[in-house]
Amino acid sequence: MEMTQTLREEFNAADIWTQHATRAVFFIGGFGAASWAPLVPLLRERLAIGEDILGLLLLCIGIGSLLTMPLSGAAAVRLGCRKVLTFASLAFAVLLFLLSQVSEILAAVPVLLLFGAVMGCIDVVVNIQAVIVEKASGRRLMSGMHGLWSVGGFAGAGLFGVWVGGLGLSPTTSTLIAAGIMTGAILFFARFLLPYRMLAVPRGIVTFVGIIACIAFLVEGAIMDWSGVFLTAVRGFDMSLAGTGFTVFSAAMLTMRLIGDRLVQEMGQKRVILGGSLLALAGFLAVIFAPEAWLLYAGFFAIGVGSANIVPVFFSLLGRQKDMPIGLAVPAVSTLGYLGILMGPAAIGALAHAASLYAAFGLLAGLAAVQFVIAGYVYRKVL
């Protein structure tokens, strides 16, 4: 039986509320990740540590994600997406609040491990569901789905700045509000989430798509984890502005993902993914060499615009490759993608300690160039 027909009969994946629920989980993932970004420099201050130790601590997020991502598909097999995403989203909210409280390294390590674990779990399972929903609906939805991650990112980073800098709320109160928003959202939408199954190791062209996802996740994670430190410790910005770089980046991703499905239809997938890689490269160069603050922010904006639709387009292209079934390919790509989060924090922290954050962002610029080359190869092979 045709996969799309089976999904419609068994899961009713084309239901409008199922689409809304999928978008809601993307929002929760982005909102939680962005709410964590302004806490990074605060955690560094509370623990009184340098960039090298901070990088190792942030490595815990990647390790946690890497450990759970291969298991997330298995959990979906046994429990269904609804239970997995509901539990992970609630845990995400609780752990976010705990991160605003930890004041000892020994306490921070397990919390960061668990935080990365549930974040990786959410990303794998919601992307599986998003591919199913898009296929069942017969419409291009993936960029819009990922756009809700950017909506969450923009809202999380922006609201934190408003709460702390504008209203004078404490980081603890602000984080508690953020956790409450995440909790309310998942409790409302959980009933509309779908069950699904399958797990696999990547092979063939799926491996190259995974490398692209690895670079994309590394870039996004680097902006989330290190932009606040870069602005405050390197550029001398006030602590209340720590989240502004990520906010600009998220706003750009939000804008481009919301119009991404139409953009892909009008410009074509090739221009979006190759042009996006080059624009992200230009953005990193602007951030590194910007003599003025406005140009620095323009760089963050360019990175967001360029990166926004690369991963959504390639998740859609997974439906055209023949090397693996789609239900196996998505978690396999997501697992490889989270290697970027595993490697990124420690590598950037070590390089920043040995040289500078400028050098670390130069590494990210180089990876954007590598992404451009691999993306061109994958596009030719798939299409």
Image (cartoon, grey):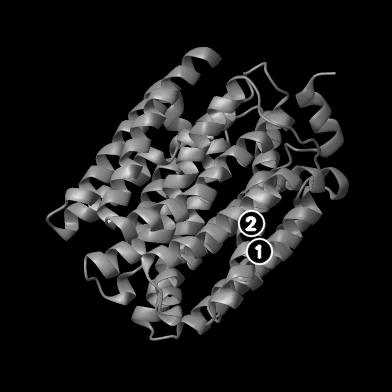
Horizontal and vertical percent position of residue 333: 61, 35
Given the image, on which type of amino acid does mark 1 rest? Leu
Question: Which of the two discs, 1 and 2, labels the residue nearer the N terminus?
Answer: 2
Q: Decide: is 351 above or below 94.
A: above
Given the image, on which type of amino acid does mark 2 rest? Gly
Question: Where the N terminus falls, by quadrant?
Answer: top right
In the image, which disc is placed on residue 114? 1
Q: Decide: is 369 above or below 193.
A: above
Residue at 37% over, 65% down: 51
Few, some or many residues within 10 Å of mark 1 (<14, 14–19, 20+):
many
Left or right side of 184 for 301:
left
Q: Is residue 110 visible?
A: yes
Q: Quadrant of residue 135 in the image?
A: top right
Residue at 45% over, 18% down: 377
Residue at 32% over, 76% down: 239
Residues tagged 1 and 2 counted as in contact (Cβ below 8 A): yes
Left or right side of 337 for 90:
right
The kind of secondary structure element at disc 1 is helix
The kind of secondary structure element at disc 2 is helix
Residue holding disc 2 = 64
Horizontal and vertical percent position of residue 2: 80, 19
Between 102 and 153, which is closer to the camera in this rendering? Answer: 102
Left or right side of 233 for 94:
right
